[in-house]
Amino acid sequence: MEISQEKIKYKRISRKKTLFFDDKENRSNFFESIFPLPWTIWPYEAKILLVLIGLWSILGICILGSSSWWVASREMGNWAYFLKKQIIWTIPGISLFYYVLNTNIKNLLKFSRIIFYILFFLIFLTNITGITVNGSSRWLVLGNLRMQPSELIKPFLILEASNLFAHWNLIKSEKKLISIISFGLLILLILKQPNLSTASLTGILFWVMGLCGGVKLSSLTSFASIGLITGCISILNNEYQKLRVTSFINPWKDEQGSGFQLVQSLLAIGSGGLFGQGFGLSVQKLQYLPFMYTDFIFAIFAEEFGLLGCTLFLGFLVVFSYITLRISFKCRNNYTKLVAIGCGVLLVGQSIMHIAVATGSMPTTGLPLPFISYGGNSLIASFFIAGMLLRCSLESTGFIGMISTRKTLN
């Protein structure tokens, strides 16, 4: 009788162990079916990066909901109007992130040129048939959708710059000239909208990637000088841009006119104090600060979370930059190395420029804060770029996506 009881007990324990290991194995197989590599062999940079991207996205949803509910209630009759639309745009953004994460960088480099020139043409069209909002023609209307090609082209700027600079010294002069002229024309078209901030960010991206790709410093200095002169000419020829520059120098001179946005942004940041007013308790978002959920969303964040919250967010960007550098150092070829650098420059550089605008450190421009500002075009581009960066980290292991160094250079 005692032996029978022990057998029954042993069978129950054995069954529980079997169910436990089966469940663990099923979860492991599920994870491996979603991601291109098993979690156990992911580089620690990739693991940290995935967590950072998740935190950034969740923070963006929370801050957008807080900054937009008042204006959504007043103008749309639904406090969650902008929040719902952003969540809807998050779904294709995450889907694109998943697709890019499971696609070799080599394959992305192959088809990037076609999409690059399609979006190039659409940017050209915005200067002819685009709708004008707040003095800039940046949007094309396609049915019920508003497309902003200058945002959607950003991931493909990285890929095309990588194609050019990965083996700069081996590429024929004709190809160099054609690519540089194409990039220059693109920047001019973006300036024509006018969109000085995106044009500047594009120029900085090409400059940094060229520097990392081995372009001579003397040539880069010449390109930077040409870009600076072109930017100055654009400002002098556009009264809209000229007013923004003069108001940036002294916004209090015309605080009810051209300096209104910056003055209200500074008031929001200053009223945040050390610990902030508290989540959802911003006063400036009550239709005092224009574009509080897009171009000046950082000011609302600063008002609600104070100096401490701003310091933590800047620290977050520092950690993100460090992880990006670690990924680029570990990449096994020039292509993925430059893609990783370009992704970091766009995500972190755009964030810094947005913060600089909100704090009055640079002239007021319409540049969204990645993953946080309202806008489907910006959100999709940000997820695409984040997916490429994470893919570069996974390919640095050498288990997937090896790129042959014998690429056609002519």
Image (spheres, rainbow, N blue to C red):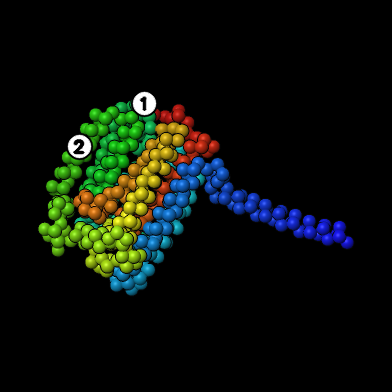
As drawn, which residue projects farthest toward the right? 1
- Can you say whether 34 is above or below 221 in the image? below
Mark 1 to mark 2 CA distance (whole Å): 25 Å
Q: Are marks 1 and 2 in contact (CB under 8 Å)?
A: no
Quarter of the image containing the N terminus? bottom right
Q: Amino acid at mark 2?
A: Ile
Q: Is residue 372 left or right of residue 10?
A: left
Disc 2 is placed on an element classified as helix
Depth order, front residue of 65/271: 271
- Residue under numbered circle 1: 170
Residue 259 percent across, percent down from the top left: 16, 58
Depth order, front residue of 330/183: 330
Q: Amino acid at mark 1?
A: Leu
Q: Residue at x 13, y 58 (%)?
A: 252
- Residue under numbered circle 2: 226
Residue 227 percent across, percent down from the top left: 21, 39
